[in-house]
Image (cartoon, rainbow, N blue to C red):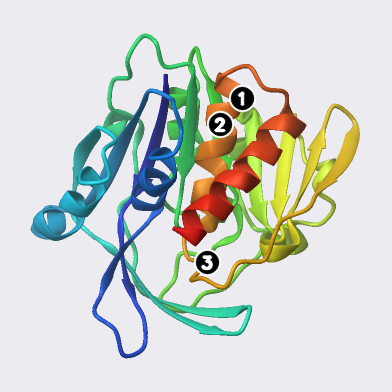
C-alpha cells in the first residue's frame, strides 16, 4: 500500500479553461496503469472542492479530501521545452495535526509540495513515522511568494532528515548544487525527454527516455508515484526508475 499527500491546484494556461493541477491529480493519471493499492490525500479550499476533487476521483484511485482555506493557483506557459510559471495563489500549509491517519498497510508515502511552505519539517517527521518517505524537491526550492515563480536553496535542512527518496527536476537540482551531496539515500533527477539520473548506493546511473509530443504537465508527479510504487513492490532504485520512465511515457501518449 502506498499513499500520496499534496495540495490540488488550479492551473491556468493561455487561451484555455482552468485545469485541475497538483500531484493528487497527475499521480491518479499514472496510477491507472499501475497494479498497486494506493490512496490519495488531496487538499484545496472548501469552496473549490466540488470543482477540483471530482476529476481526481474519476480516475479511479481512492481520494480522501483534506479541508483547506486556500487553493494554489498557477499561470503556466510553454515555449517549446521551456516552461514559465506565475504564482497567483499559495495553497495551505500542512501542519502535523493535518496529517490524516494512514492504513496500517501503508509503508511508502510520497509527499508532493507545490511550494516550500506546503510541508514543514515537523509535518514530514510525523508522516515518516514507521514508513518510507518520498519528497518532491519543489518543497525545497520553490519560493512561496506571488508573482514569477522563483527557485533558491534557502530551505530548512531539517526537511531532509526523514526523507528516503528525493525527486528533483533538472532546474531544481541546479538550484541545490551537487545531488550526490544531499543527505538522502536516493535522489532522482528528471531531465524531461532526456530521461533521468539516479543517485543511490554511491552510484550514478542515467536512464534514457523517448521524446513524446504531448503536454508534459504532471510528468514529474507521475514519475514520482510510479517510482514509489516500484520501490514498495520490491524493485531496486534503478529498476524502479526505469519503470517510472515507461509509465510516464505511456501516460503522456494516452
User: In the rendered structure, are the residues bearing label 1 and label 2 in contact, judged by CB atoms less than 8 Å apart?
Assistant: yes
Residue at numbered disc 3? 216
Q: Residue furthest top?
A: 104
Residue 179: x and y in percent read 80, 48
Distance CA(mark 1)–CA(mark 2): 5 Å
Left or right of 122, for residue 41: left
Residue 110: x and y in percent read 49, 35
Residue 74: x and y in percent read 38, 73
- Circle 1 — which element? helix
Q: Residue furthest front?
A: 254
| Badge number at residue 178 | none
Residue 148: x and y in percent read 49, 81
Is residue 171 something that shows in the picture? no
Residue at numbered disc 1? 231
Q: At 25% across and 75% down in the image, what residue appears? A: 18
The answer to which image quadrant residue 244 occupies is top right
Distance CA(mark 3)–CA(mark 2): 20 Å
Above/below status of 45 relative to 181: below
Mark 3 surroundings within 10 Å by alpha-carbon count, few (fewer than 14), some (14 through 19), many (20 or more): some
Q: Quadrant of the C terminus?
A: bottom left
The answer to which image quadrant residue 101 occupies is top left
Mark 2 surroundings within 10 Å by alpha-carbon count, few (fewer than 14), some (14 through 19), many (20 or more): many
Q: At 81% across and 39% down in the image, what residue appears? A: 199
Distance CA(mark 3)–CA(mark 1): 24 Å
- Circle 3 — which element? loop
Above/below status of 49 relative to 162: below
Q: Quadrant of the N terminus?
A: top left
| Badge number at residue 228 | 2
Amino acid at each position: 500500500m502506498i499513499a500520496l499527500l499534496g495540495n490540488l491546484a488550479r492551473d491556468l494556461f493561455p487561451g484555455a479553461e482552468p485545469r485541475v493541477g497538483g500531484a493528487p491529480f497527475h499521480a491518479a493519471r499514472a496510477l491507472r496503469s499501475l497494479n498497486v493499492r494506493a490512496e490519495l490525500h488531496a487538499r484545496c479550499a472548501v469552496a473549490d472542492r466540488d470543482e477540483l476533487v471530482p476529476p481526481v476521483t474519476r480516475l479511479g484511485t481512492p481520494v480522501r479530501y483534506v479541508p483547506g482555506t486556500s487553493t494554489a493557483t498557477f499561470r503556466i506557459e510553454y515555449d517549446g521545452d521551456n516552461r514559465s510559471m506565475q504564482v497567483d495563489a499559495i495553497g495551505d500549509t500542512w501542519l502535523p495535526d493535518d496529517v490524516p491517519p494512514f492504513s496500517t498497510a501503508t509503508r511508502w508515502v510520497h509527499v508532493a509540495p507545490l511550494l516550500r511552505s506546503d510541508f514543514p519539517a515537523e509535518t514530514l517527521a510525523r508522516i515518516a513515522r514507521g514508513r518510507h518517505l518520498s519528497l518532491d524537491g519543489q518543497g525545497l526550492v520553490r519560493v512561496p511568494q506571488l508573482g514569477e515563480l522563483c527557485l533558491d536553496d534557502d530551505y530548512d535542512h531539517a526537511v531532509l532528515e526523514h526523507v528516503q527518496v528525493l525527486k528533483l527536476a533538472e532546474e531544481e537540482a541546479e538550484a541545490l548544487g551537487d545531488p550526490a551531496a544531499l543527505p538522502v539515500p536516493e535522489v532522482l533527477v528528471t531531465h524531461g525527454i532526456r530521461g533521468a539520473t539516479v543517485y543511490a548506493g554511491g552510484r550514478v546511473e542515467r536512464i534514457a527516455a523517448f521524446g513524446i509530443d504531448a503536454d508534459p504537465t504532471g510528468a514529474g508527479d507521475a514519475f514520482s508515484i510510479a517510482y514509489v510504487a516500484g520501490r514498495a513492490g520490491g524493485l531496486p532504485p534503478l529498476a524502479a526508475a526505469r519503470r517510472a520512465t515507461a509509465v510516464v511515457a505511456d501516460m503522456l501518449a494516452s
